């Protein structure tokens, strides 16, 4: 690390300055990284905050000298474990970037099935070594999580600004419903559609309900999320336990509750 760039303030033990950052992907669709590049209106401002030294989607240069690593995707292969550990060694701050990295994301749906079945069904005659899906923190220490599938670019920029300024990053505690109400949307339950907004962590500005699609919980549970009450609301609005289960296990953030509900239902899928 170049000591000439160091200043006296620190965050999570890392000196504050224009941080050198790297973006990396494990098993993922790379949609979270793409979110940043898509934000053309503020991309230059963002680049003035950080020095990007490794970002395969955006540049040819590769450097292993970075303070902050944003790691997208979940761990599904042996070689990814080694790679992730190496990134962890290099980085002062390791950020789980997106829902795959935070809690398995859509990838973790694979864990519902036997590995042999997955290998046959997905890879057929071109088998690859693949294992059950794990979030980053099952393998290495994670300092910070940025939720969402994909992450919301405005939120990422805000969080990175906080890190660069040495301010604490505080995630939204309230659920998506709060933002949905603030946006003056008609509640989707009133027009016959299910939605996990009452229990899902806010911060996406009710992205889906504002576009007339129910929330699937991609940001994981809000603080003090009352899943029992959510289940009750779903049932009162005529939705089957399968509908509830499909939603809460889609991204992995509600896995503990999903497991319990599955057991309660005697479901062996
Ligand atoms: S969280 Fe969603 S958008 Fe991001 S890498 Fe995973 S699947 Fe893609
Ligand atoms: S549509 Fe969803 S997020 Fe919006 S108020 Fe209704 S339950 Fe809450
Ligand atoms: S509304 Fe729900 S599913 Fe849609 S982006 Fe927000 S948290 Fe994710």
Image: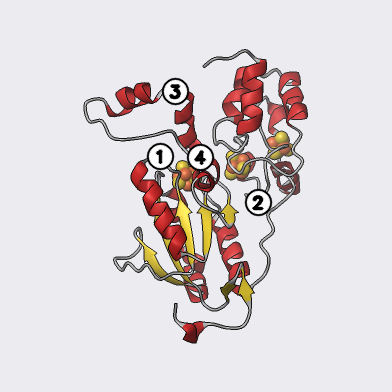
Disc 1, disc 4: CB below 8 Å?
Answer: no
Q: Nearer the viewer, residue 13 or 242?
A: 13
Q: Secondary structure at mark 4?
A: loop
- Residue at x-position 50% and y-position 73%: 19
Q: CA distance from mark 1 to mark 2?
A: 28 Å
Assess mark 2: CB under 8 A from ligand 3? yes
Which residue is farthest top?
266
Assess mark 3: CB under 8 A from ligand 1? no
Q: Quadrant of the N terminus?
A: bottom left
Judged left or right of residue 39, residue 197 is: right
Q: Residues within 10 Å of mark 2 (few under 14, many from 20)?
A: many
In the rendered view, tell whether residue 57 sits above or below residue 256: below
- The image quadrant that residue 238 belongs to is top right
Q: Residues within 10 Å of mark 1 (few under 14, many from 20)?
A: many
Give the label, 2 or 4, closer to the camera: 4
Disc 2, disc 4: CB below 8 Å?
Answer: no
Ligand 2 located in image quadrant: top right
Any mark on residue 203, and which? 2
Q: CA distance from mark 1 to mark 4?
A: 10 Å
Question: Which numbered disc flags the more N-terminal residue, 1 or 2?
Answer: 1
Disc 1, disc 3: CB below 8 Å?
Answer: no
The residue carrying mark 1 is 76
């Amino acid at each position: 690390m170049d000591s000439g760039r160091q200043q006296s303030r620190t965050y999570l033990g890392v000196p504050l300055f224009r941080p050198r950052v790297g973006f990396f992907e494990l098993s993922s669709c790379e949609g979270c990284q793409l979110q940043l590049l898509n934000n053309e209106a503020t991309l230059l401002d963002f680049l003035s905050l950080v020095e990007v030294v490794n970002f395969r989607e955006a540049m040819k240069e590769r450097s292993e000298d970075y303070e902050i690593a944003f790691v997208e995707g979940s761990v599904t292969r042996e070689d990814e474990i080694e790679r992730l550990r190496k990134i962890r060694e290099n980085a002062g701050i390791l950020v789980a970037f997106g829902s795959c990295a935070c809690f398995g994301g859509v990838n973790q749906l694979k864990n519902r099935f036997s590995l042999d079945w997955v290998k046959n069904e997905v890879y057929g005659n071109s088998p690859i070594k693949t294992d059950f899906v794990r979030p980053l923190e099952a393998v290495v220490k994670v300092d910070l999580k940025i939720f969402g599938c994909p992450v919301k670019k405005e939120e990422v920029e805000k969080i990175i600004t906080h890190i660069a300024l040495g301010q604490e990053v505080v995630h939204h505690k309230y659920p998506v419903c709060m933002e949905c109400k603030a946006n003056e949307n008609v509640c989707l339950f009133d027009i016959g559609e299910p939605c996990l907004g009452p229990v899902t962590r806010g911060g996406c500005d009710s992205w889906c309900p504002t576009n007339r699609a129910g929330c699937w919980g991609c940001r994981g549970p809000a603080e003090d999320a009352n899943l029992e009450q959510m289940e009750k609301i779903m049932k009162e609005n005529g939705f089957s336990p399968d509908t509830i289960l499909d939603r809460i296990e889609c991204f992995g953030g509600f896995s503990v509750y999903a497991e319990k509900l599955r057991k309660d239902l005697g479901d062996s899928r």
